[in-house]
Image (tube, rainbow, N blue to C red):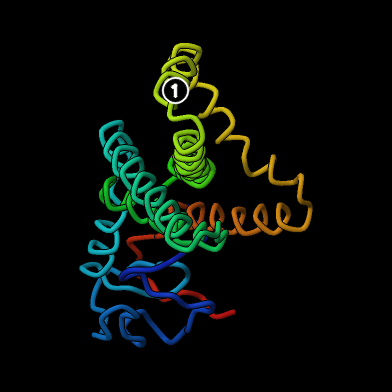
Amino acid sequence: MFAVMDENTGGGVPQFTTAEYGSGAAANPCKACGKPIGGNYYQVNGVQVCTPCTDKIKTQFPADSHSAFVRGLLFGIGGAIVGLALYVAVALGTGLVIGIVSLAVGFIVGKSMVFGSGGVRGRRYQIAAVALTYAAVSLSAVPVYISQQMKHRSEVQAQLAEQHGASSDAASSATAQRPGALRAIGVLVLLGLASPFLDMADPAHGLIGLVILFVGIRIAWKLTAEKQVNIVGPLNAAPTAV
């Protein structure tokens, strides 16, 4: 028996909910190619499939490996970066944080991981896809915040320059008092990761954002879920009618 587990069936795998029974294996054509079955055959998800088509179906489910997971993870990280950039671009371009972009981020991350792994899916791919989707969406708050602060600072400095003409000295003094760069980056990353929950300070806006983020994560989870295919055989006798 050859079995692969997943919620989604797709590709060249025949999708049927009930099996058809006849007087023999040759009485029904192959459910994948439609040709008469001669000799041995297999049952794929409960329906009859010829040997050549069964071999093709098996090749659609490559074996998992460390290298496949690493490739999938690297492509997933790339997809997360693209998703983060998309989120930031929309936020800065519109002046609004549009949570629905989370759906696109989840799709990009999930598809990237599957492409990178060569079609291999599984639980560890799902966990990685969820983590990357959440990180991409939550950390998008960091560059948006930095952009807003830089804009605000430039406005303040312009006002100081007009009023006192000594903004450069004030700016130098403020720069000397800033915390170390690594510490500042660490704080920003932590705040970014917590941002979906910090947004709950505005319950209505925060809750909607969390729900949309969950849907985006769900998309990534489903795209990287293992496929379920149950292959029994080879058989050479007609199945017993029920």
- Residue 99's spot in the image, x, y percent? 57, 59
* Callout 1 amino acid: Ala
Q: Is residue 24 above or below residue 51?
A: below
Image quarter of residue 23: bottom left
Between 232 and 6, the residue placed more toward the observer is 6
Between 78 and 129, the residue placed more toward the observer is 78
- Residue 190's spot in the image, x, y percent? 56, 27
Quadrant of the image for the C terminus? bottom right
Between 39 and 206, the residue placed more toward the observer is 206
Question: Alpha-carbon neighbours of circle 1 within 10 Å: few (<14), some, or many (≥20)?
Answer: few
Which residue occupies 31% across, 85% down? 29
Total numbered badges shown on the rendered structure:
1
Can residue 84 be seen here?
yes
Residue holding disc 1: 171
- Residue 120's spot in the image, x, y percent? 33, 48
Which residue occupies 43% across, 30% down? 165
The kind of secondary structure element at disc 1 is helix
Q: Is residue 159 above or below residue 114?
A: above
Q: Is residue 22 left or right of residue 100?
A: left
Between 178 and 141, the residue placed more toward the observer is 178
Q: Is residue 72 left or right of residue 169?
A: left
Can residue 124 be seen here?
no
Which residue occupies 44% across, 23% down? 171
Which residue occupies 33% across, 69% down? 11
Q: Is residue 184 above or below residue 12?
A: above
- Residue 230's spot in the image, x, y percent? 44, 59
